[in-house]
Amino acid sequence: MAADFKAVMSDLTSMARTFHEQARAYRELGPSLSPPGVSGGDAGLDSALREVALLISALHCGFADRLDDHGDLVAKSRDAFRRHDIDVHGLFEDLMPDGEG
């Protein structure tokens, strides 16, 4: 594998790891971003505030999931590049007469 290709592979590995690490860190922020509910003195207002808090929590979890998904996609791309490189090198070696590859 060429040196520049190895650099790209390590960059992709680092990127995938960073996406996963940041998704985990973002999930850990959840409890501190979700204060306990309070009573506003009106049942309708309390219900609306509760629903908004649930929506914000769901969006928070969804964003962390998207970060994880991006990490998975980067890792999948890295693995596809690696398989492709092995296939190209194998084809080249198969085409070369014995002793020249």
Image: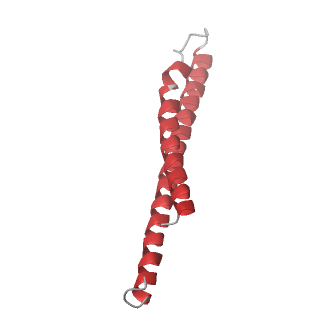
* Residue at (53% x, 40% y) in the render: 62
* Left or right: 100, with 33 as reference point: left
* Residue at (57% x, 36% y) in the render: 59
Q: Is residue 54 above or below residue 19?
A: above
Q: Residue furthest bottom?
A: 97
Q: Nearer the viewer, residue 31 or 18?
A: 18
Q: Nearer the viewer, residue 1 or 8?
A: 1
Q: Residue furthest front?
A: 99
Q: Quadrant of the C terminus?
A: bottom left
Q: Residue furthest left?
A: 98
Q: Is residue 37 above or below residue 98?
A: above
Q: Position of residue 85 (x, y in %)?
A: 47, 70
Q: Position of residue 18 (x, y in %)?
A: 52, 41
Q: Is residue 84 above or below residue 23?
A: below
* Residue at (47% x, 34% y) in the render: 24
Picture quarter containing residue 42? top right
* Left or right: 98, with 82 as reference point: left
> Which coloring applies here?
secondary structure
* Residue at (56% x, 57% y) in the render: 8
Q: Position of residue 32 (x, y in %)?
A: 52, 19
Q: Nearer the viewer, residue 86 or 68?
A: 86
